[in-house]
Every structure is written in structure tokens, then in C-alpha cells.
Amino acid sequence: MGTAMFPLGAVLFPHTPVALRIFEERYLVMLGRLLDEADPAFGVVLIERGSETGGGDQRFALGTMAQLSHVVPQAGQMQIVARGAERFEIVEWLDDDPYPRAEVRVLPDLEWNDALMPLLEEADRIVRRVLARAQQFGGTRWDPEVELSDEPLARAWQLAAIAPLGELDQMELLRSATLGGLLRATIDLTLAAEPLLADPVPDGVIVVDENPGDGD
């Protein structure tokens, strides 16, 4: 049977919520079957090439299980909320009919050590500071003052999730083999991204299109 999979254009981290709008027939079928289970969950992987709709996409081989928590029916679609759980790696992709499925191997969770607390606090400060700067230019999903878990392991993953990074950097964080490595990489990647935050184009500046169309 395999594990139900939901390829997305975004990375899901453990201990982090995700809200999805489901309207494709294949995922409505998947959701219907999941709701018959006592503990409904599905795998989320980042799409490497292609789009979220229509199929035919290429996917990364590492992802996160999503525990389904809320389902809200709407006209012709479903709004769902799930929460990231354990990470997994793809062993083998199965037939996408009637929806994407795969054989997976669950990865052990990272281990917390109290000696990491100063690193966790530093990561918290840096991520929130850079996130506040990114918010000035719009397009940030998370508020810099978002409340995170008091549990250190969950908080570390949540910091990785809210850091204003691109999907490939997020995949690097998701691959972390140790919690210390996750925190250090979160700090390093966030600091590296900070200089890339630029002021919006000032009023009156003309942007030249380097690839103009033929026109009429």
C-alpha cells in the first residue's frame, strides 16, 4: 500500500504546522482514505522540479510526516491543518494511482542536550532579528514575535522553519544529523541570507527588462 504522499513547493519541518487547500481529485481521494484511519498522517516532500498540480513532478527523497489535525469542508475542496512529525527518507516511489505513494524509512529524531541551550538562545535571537528585517520588505510568512514551543527540541525545529530562507537552504536544515548541527546551520544560513535583504526599488527608478518580448 505504501505511505500517502503530498509533494509540495515548500518544506515541512517537524513540530511545525502546515495549512493546505485540497481540491485535486487524487488528494481528495487520499484524504477520504486517511480519515478512515485512527491516526491519519501523510508524507510531505519538496518538489524538486515541476508544479504541485497535475502530477509529473520530480521530488526530493527526504521529507516529514504530517499528522492531520483539522479538516474543514468547503465548496468542492477541503481546508486541512497538519503538524510536522518525524522525518523520513524515500525507499521507493510507488505508482501515483490514485495518489502519490512511497515506501519510506522513518529517521530517528535529533537528541537534545542541555549544553546546547546557549546555541538555541543565540539561534532564537538571530532568526527573530533577521526575520524582523525581512518583514520590512514584505513576503515573510512568519511574524518575528511568533510564539514557539517551550520544549527545546521542538523550538529548534520551529526556528529552522521560521528562518527567512529559500527551499534549498531549508532542505539543508532538514538533513541535519545532530541538533547542534541544525542550530549552527540555522544561524549560519540566516546570517548569510541577511545581506541579500535589499530595499525595495525606490519610486521613480526604471527597471530594465533584460528579456523583452517581441511586442506588437
Image (cartoon, helix red, strand yellow):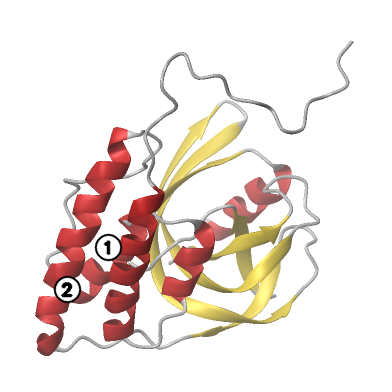
Pick the residue in front: 80 or 167. 167
- The amino acid marked with disc number 1 is Leu
Q: What label does residue 57 carry, if any?
A: none
- The amino acid at mark 2 is Leu
Q: Quadrant of residue 109?
A: bottom left
> Residue shown at 69%/42% (left/top)?
24
Instruction: Mark 2: give few (<14), some (14-19) or many (20+) Cα within 10 Å.
Output: many
Rendered view: 15 above or below 137: below
Q: Position of residue 148 (x, y in %)?
A: 18, 57
Residue 212 percent across, percent down from the top left: 78, 26
154 lies above or below 89: above
Cβ atoms under marks 1 and 2 closer than 8 Å = yes
Residue pictured at 52% horizontal, 79% vertical: 88
Q: Is residue 155 left or right of residue 73?
A: left
- Vertical arrangement, residue 173 with respect to residue 162, above or below: below
Can you tell which mark lies on residue 120? 2
